[in-house]
Amino acid sequence: DAMVIQNPRYQVTQFGKPVTLSCSQTLNHNVMYWYQQKSSQAPKLLFHYYDKDFNNEADTPDNFQSRRPNTSFCFLDIRSPGLGDAAMYLCATETGTGGLPLHFGNGTRLTVT
Amino acid sequence: QKEVEQNSGPLSVPEGAIASLNCTYSDRGSQSFFWYRQYSGKSPELIMFIYSNGDKEDGRFTAQLNKASQYVSLLIRDSQPSDSATYLCAVKPSSGSARQLTFGSGTQLTVLP
């Protein structure tokens, strides 16, 4: 089945230790998003790619970076995780033809110790 | 500031009753409206989307949109314990990033057996 897959499902990292979260999709969608969701809060958009074009949200900290080496894969890099970065990280895709809605992956729960 | 407001709940209804979830939005020019269901610790799952004023029905779910009053609602008929989850309202704004959805913080629904 076509889908959005995030790995790992759970990630534990130490304060200040770089961590990378991955997302892959078999939907062949042009747009890939990264959201951060903290407990009882709305998902917050960090950035998105439209094909190779990177779009960063104005309030996304510089500590967060992203790479999209090809259509299928997208990575979220957190250069120096702080305790406040503990959250669920959601990858989502969209066709890019204006036809929302978003298709979400299962998420990665990040714990920072 | 474009915002999407939802009552956080918790909203409790008995099994078999109608659950009514409401959402208001501030951007009058918003075009697309989505309801996502999110189980605890899981990623959001699309339930319904609606673009035009009026009602849209899909099984036990009905989305209602009133652009003049800037609200969108979700009715769940014959509620089941498996419907217990957080329901996120998401709105596509009329300006800014064409790709960005604004999410509400969600309403927690509990269906009591």
Image (tube, rainbow, N blue to C red):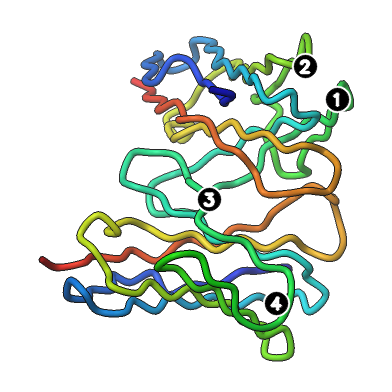
N-terminal of the pair, mark 3 or mark 4, is 4
Give the foreground label among 4 and 2.
2
Q: Quadrant of residue B1?
A: bottom right
The reply to whether discs 1 and 2 touch (Cβ–Cβ < 8 Å) is yes
The reply to whether discs 4 and 2 touch (Cβ–Cβ < 8 Å) is no
Judged from the image, the secondary structure of the residue bearing numbered disc 2 is loop
Q: In whole angstroms, how far apart are the C-alphas of marks 3 and 4?
A: 22 Å
- Side of B72 relative to B74 (left or right): right
Q: Quadrant of residue B5?
A: bottom right
Note whether B23 is above or below A34 in the view shown. below
Residue B82 location in percent, x, y? 25, 54
Q: Residue at x 38, y 47 (%)?
A: A39
Instruction: Look at mark 3 in the image and give the residue it sits on.
Output: B46
Q: Residue at x 71, y 28 (%)?
A: A62
Chain to which mark 4 belongs = B
Instruction: Look at mark 4 in the image and give the residue it sits on.
Output: B26
Q: In whole angstroms, how far apart are the C-alphas of marks 1 and 3?
A: 23 Å
Residue A51's label in the rendered image is 1
Could you classify mark 4 by the number of other residues whose Cα lies within 10 Å: few (under 14), some (14-19), or many (20 or more)?
some
Could you classify mark 2 by the number of other residues whose Cα lies within 10 Å: few (under 14), some (14-19), or many (20 or more)?
some
- Say which quadrant the C terminus of chain A sits in: top left
Could you classify mark 1 by the number of other residues whose Cα lies within 10 Å: few (under 14), some (14-19), or many (20 or more)?
some
Chain to which mark 1 belongs = A
Instruction: Look at mark 2 in the image and give the residue it sits on.
Output: A71
